[in-house]
Image (tube, rainbow, N blue to C red):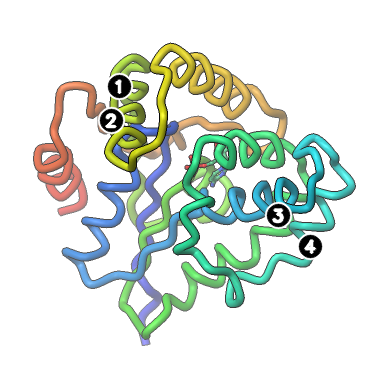
Amino acid sequence: MTDPVVIAVDGPAASGKGTLARRLAAELGYAYLDTGLLYRAVGLALIRAGLSPADQKAAIHAAAVFDAAAEDFSDPALRNEETGAAAGIVAVIPAVRDALIGVQRRFAANPPGGAPGAVLDGRDIGTVICPDADYKLFVEADIEERARRRVKELQDRGDAVIPARVLKEMKERDERDRTRAVAPLAPAADASVVNTTNLNADAAFALAMSLIR
Ligand code: C5P
């Protein structure tokens, strides 16, 4: 048995990393893990318990008892903006991050369904979770373009949207992700940067495939 191939796809919110990672996994027959959902699940557990995501003790407990096998990842509440903001707040807590490392590394080492590889997307996959990944992509785009994409995504879902607020909250989350002490959002030294500001999903995918091949 050869080790599974691991592709790390990191980048800020709405950079296109999720779309790209999912498509790479489908093309290559690899398993896909959206690691943002793990932090979102912890944030949502606090919201649902009526607790503040800034409540460190509660966040650490929620991460410690988090069970990926029992989680309903199709719950739409995981994907809303309030949950995303809560995820960004719990994600600065080192003990929360530590509690979620195992599930991510196990996924990469033993991709579900016996897949020959795994694609993980997040913020610290290439730097912390899988520093030995076979391929590392860092997907980014200008903040205005990312906010525009997020507004469209929310509108398509029928959510009420205030574009200026989406931009402001995205800037805040970016800042928190980039400046936190543990596992800040940053390209790994050996990552290839894919800037999607002027690329549609097809062009970003073609570029990523050319980098991998
Ligand atoms: O990618 P997504 O927007 O779902 O991530 C939500 C939040 O979870 C991010 O803003 C970030 O703070 C945190 N996160 C992280 N490390 C990851 C994935 C997500 O810190 N690998």
Ligand 1 contact, mark 3 (Cβ < 8 Å): no
Q: Please, what is the three-letter code of the amino acid marked with disc 2? A: Lys
Of the image marks 3 and 1, the number of the one nearer the N terminus = 3
Tag 4–tag 2 contact (CB < 8 Å): no
The residue drawn where x is 37% and y is 84% is: 113
Measure the C-alpha gap from mark 4 to mark 3: 12 Å
Tag 1–tag 4 contact (CB < 8 Å): no
Q: Name the residue under label 3.
A: 45
Of the image marks 2 and 3, the number of the one nearer the N terminus = 3
Find residue 178 and report its image quarter: top right
Q: Mark 4 points at which residue?
A: 64
Measure the C-alpha gap from mark 4 to mark 2: 35 Å
Which of labels 4 and 3 is toward the front?
Answer: 3
Of the image marks 1 and 4, the number of the one nearer the N terminus = 4
Q: Name the residue under label 2.
A: 152
The 10 Å Cα crowd at callout 1, few under 14, some 14 to 19, many 20 or more, is: some
Q: Horizontal placement of 188 versus 32: left or right? A: right
Residue 122 x/y as whole percent: 47, 46
Q: Which element carries disc 4, helix, strand or loop?
A: helix
Q: Which element carries disc 2, helix, strand or loop?
A: helix
Q: In this view, does 118 lie above or below 90?
A: below
Measure the C-alpha gap from mark 2 to mark 3: 27 Å
Residue 29 x/y as whole percent: 23, 72
Residue 67 x/y as whole percent: 67, 71
Tag 2–tag 1 contact (CB < 8 Å): yes
Q: Which element carries disc 3, helix, strand or loop?
A: helix
Q: Horizontal placement of 131 versus 15: left or right? A: right
Of the image marks 4 and 3, the number of the one nearer the N terminus = 3
